[in-house]
Image (cartoon, coloured by chain):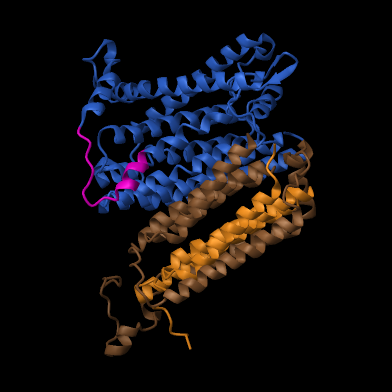
Amino acid sequence: MELLVFAIFAGLALASALTVVLHRDPVKSTLSLVVTLFSTGVLFVLLGAPFVGVLQVLVYTGAIVVLFLFVVMLLNLQREARRSEPGGSFQKVAAGAGALAFAAFAGIAVWRTSADAEAAELTEAFVGLRGFSEELFERFLLPFEIIGLLLLVAVIAAYVVARRPEPERRLPTPLEKATGEARIDPVGEEAP
Amino acid sequence: MTPQTVASLANLGAFLGILLTVVPLMVWFERRGGALMQDRPGPNRLGPFGLLQPLADVFKFIFKEDVLPKEADRALYLMAPVLAVLPAFSTFVVIPLGPTIEWGGEELRMMVAPVETGVLLLLALASLGVYSLVIAGYASNNKYSLLGSIRASAQMISYELALTLAVVAVLLPVESFRLDLVVEAQIAGIWNIVPQALGFLVFLVAAFAETNRLPFDLPEAESELVAGYHTEYSAMRFASFFMAEYASMTVLSALGATLYFGGWHLPGVDLAALGIWGVVLGAGVLVAKIAVFLFLFVWVRWSFPRFRYDQLMAIGWKGLLPLAILNLLWVAGASLAGWL
Amino acid sequence: MSVPVAWYLVLAAAMFAVGTAGALTRRNGITIFLSIELMLNSANLTLVAYSRLLEDRTGQIVVLFVLAVAAAEAAVGLALFIALYRHRRTIDLDRVNLLRW
């Protein structure tokens, strides 16, 4: 039973991972990432980490990828044109690097865990909420608080970087510099 | 086939039965009840009190022409209604229909998925509901749809935060995510509406926003954006969106009843001692509470004007979120002091 | 028969390789970002797999932190993309090369 669930969701994860990387349309890539992350969440539950799995779905697919999707839709990103020859050899290098990474990590994994080693049975103490939260809030309390601070900083940073610069303080764009005109406003963003 | 599996399957059947009955009833009540509130007759030609109206609606939906916009992204366009229905019809799996009963020496929990992650699973599945909105608007290749879908999804993720914080406040004294433990805690003490009235207010408002119901239905308002993100959808696909909306209303009502009003608990009656009949009675009580919530949904819809989008976002972030945090602080303090 | 933990590790290695190839090959900034998220995800899977093998919950908790950091990074990265788009009307990273040698 566990084997069946693993086979389905591992296959799904790998197939959607390939779609993320290979598909031309950024919207489809993003949605494939959703499938990958959801499948990985299921695999987490299989590995005796139900809270991490559910949190992965809640946070990662439910919020972060939605953010990606917003940006893709708002910027109306066009499909990437099919790559013509310049960069062909670079693709081979990239694929080669990927294969090397895979071989290295997979090899280490198999060597260190002796390919058919089965882990001990999952106990209630390991999987249960009490143990998880005790460890999180007792041993890892400081990192937990620091992560909260990090998220606050990230929110502030994202707001500052992404807001519309006030007209007076906006740096001249390359077009304005090239033509010598000040304040070219093709989209009508600045109020009259 | 363990006894718990049988119980889970029975609960699945029961809950699906409830959902599939409630949806047409809501269609009828929305129009008939709304008419009553507005002092007009409403649908009254089909069957007594217009009760066969949903049947007529179903016929209409089945036979209407199925339109596919020409420049629309075909795969995404077809996927969006399915993506709407999936989360709506899977979130009920952690809601208990009745008391935990003893059977053959083991405890049977009356949920489809008696897992320890409980409400967290519900919230995770509900958060996937945003994708249908986003994809529907984008795939329709229509400015108004895209605008509507961006507004709707921004609204949903904003109010999800307040909803989650309200739920967390309820879970704090219980020290578990399991909803059957939440109900048992309320039986042992008092219904959570009393100590956490503020939390309930936050939950209610967030639930209205999550389901895109008035006064938060700007994304699908007819006078504002044609029909928002489902403008380009007709016939059965449109019906799917509506089914999903009513189903998620029902599940959120069930959640609200379970978290704040004791779920299947009937005050004064010890349902756990009645065995299987306790479960049936408990399910009936829960359905009655859901009905009250749904009446409230319809009542509010026909009574209030809708919020403008910037008002809506301001309420979510600047109003509800601080209130939810306040409620959480109050509950945390009360738990530490031993009152809860 | 339960699944050997090594299989999860091999899957994670494969996803990491796919993500690496994607991050190195694509021109579209968002797709590169998605590939990076894929790599982070494969690292998470490895962490949880080892946590299972070693009966130590530390791996799971670190995954929580990685999740939070990924969220922060996504927020800031996407804000950067928005600012970039506003300035240059493109996210094709092959064209954003003012600092290249």
Q: Residue at x 75, y 44 (%)?
A: A118
Q: Identify whether C55 is placed above or below A110.
A: above
Task: Point out residue B81 in the picture as x, y percentages from the top left corner.
Answer: 36, 39
Q: Nearer the viewer, residue A91 or B90?
A: A91
Residue A167 is drawn in which quadrant? bottom left
Q: Nearer the viewer, residue C40 or B61?
A: C40
Q: Quadrant of the N terminus of chain B?
A: top right
In the rendered image, the quadrant that contains the C terminus of chain B is top right
Colour chain C appears in? orange
B112 left or right, relative to A122? left
Image colour assigned to chain A: brown
Establish if B25 lies above or below A40. Answer: above
* Residue B248, placed above or below residue B187: below
**Percent coordinates x, y for residue B158 in the rendering:** 48, 49
**In the rendered view, would you say B296 is above or below A161?**
above
Residue A170 picture quarter: bottom left
Residue B39 lies within the magenta run: no
Q: Is residue C51 left or right of residue B318?
A: right
At horizontal 38% and vertical 39% (from top left) the residue drawn is: B215
Q: Which chain is blue?
A: B
Q: Position of residue B31 (x, y in %)?
A: 29, 24
Residue B72 lies within the magenta run: yes
Q: How many marks?
A: 0
State left or right for residue B285 relative to residue C29: right
- Residue A75 in sight from this viewpoint: yes
Q: Which residues are magenta?
A: B65-81
How far from the left and from the top, in percent, is residue B335?
73, 38
Can the viewer see residue B289? Answer: no
Nearer to us in this view, A111 or A45: A111
